[in-house]
Image: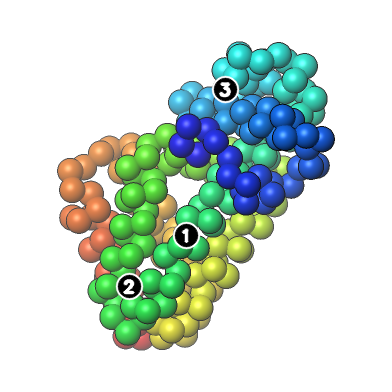
Amino acid sequence: MRNAKLSTSLTEAIDLPPPLSQKGAKKRADLLGAALRIIARDGHHQLTLRRVAEEAKSSHGAVLYYYGSRTALKCAAMEYSSAYLIETSAKIIPELEKAADRPKRFAEIPSRYNNDVLISNRSTAMAVFELNMAAAREDYLRPVLYKWGKILTELYRPAFEKLGSKNPSADVDFILHTINGLLVAQLSFPRRDFEKRILRPAIERLIGSIASS
């Protein structure tokens, strides 16, 4: 999401028709990047096709051609941000599985990940959470959120099984939702040494409880 560029794997993850050319793929990615910047900077409710065209220094017709509607564009933004979290989360799963017999080390890994990927990159975090909030009002986004939530749960589930969780899917959801709440609070009211003083100790308590249950 940095510099509003889409990787090939994330482009494939988004449920859109394949582009007719390499130039078309770049144009579509540039427009989506502009949409994400607007969402992160101004809020999801400020997203319109005309504003995306202005942000991308393109035409309203181009946005309409590649996305068709504001609804489709917002769904694509959610698909992208969700796929981004899946792709980056996948990189820490091997570490988690190796640390399954050390709860404190296990907790440190998602704490560091969330701090590096979201708290240290405020624009990414704002886009992710703005789109989650959008789903509270715009029900067409909920299937997208549900789909990627299930994928994320399944991604983490084997590591939680190795940790000793008796209900790994429920525990993954609980941990992820707890982390999200702490991250939103930090974005709203920044605190010094958040990862070390607040995020990591909270995750350690929860992981310790799961491992010892």
Taking the image as shown, residue 19 lies to the left or right of residue 127, namely right
Q: Residue at x 63, y 47 (%)?
A: 8
Residue 186 or residue 11, whichever sits in front: 11
Label 2: which residue?
106
| Other residues around mark 3 within 10 Å, as few (<14) / some (14–19) / many (≥20) | few
Residue at which label 3 appears: 46
Judged from the image, the secondary structure of the residue bearing numbered disc 3 is: helix
Q: Residue at x 37, y 53 (%)?
A: 114
Pick whichever of labels 2 and 3 is earlier in the sequence. 3
Mark 2 vs mark 3, CA separation in Å? 39 Å
Q: Where's residue 19, x and y in %? A: 78, 37
Q: Where is residue 78 drawn, in percent x and y?
A: 61, 43
For label 2, count other residues whose C-alpha is less than 10 Å away and answer few (under 14), some (14-19) or many (20+): many
Which residue is depicted at the point 53% across and 25% down? Answer: 38
The residue drawn where x is 77% and y is 16% is 61
- Image quadrant assignment for residue 105: bottom left
Q: Amino acid at mark 2?
A: Phe
Name the image quarter holding residue 210: bottom left
Q: Is residue 209 above or below residue 132?
A: below
Circle 2 or circle 3, nearest the eye: 2
Looking at the rendered structure, the kind of residue marked 3 is Gln
Q: Quick one: SS at disc 1?
A: helix
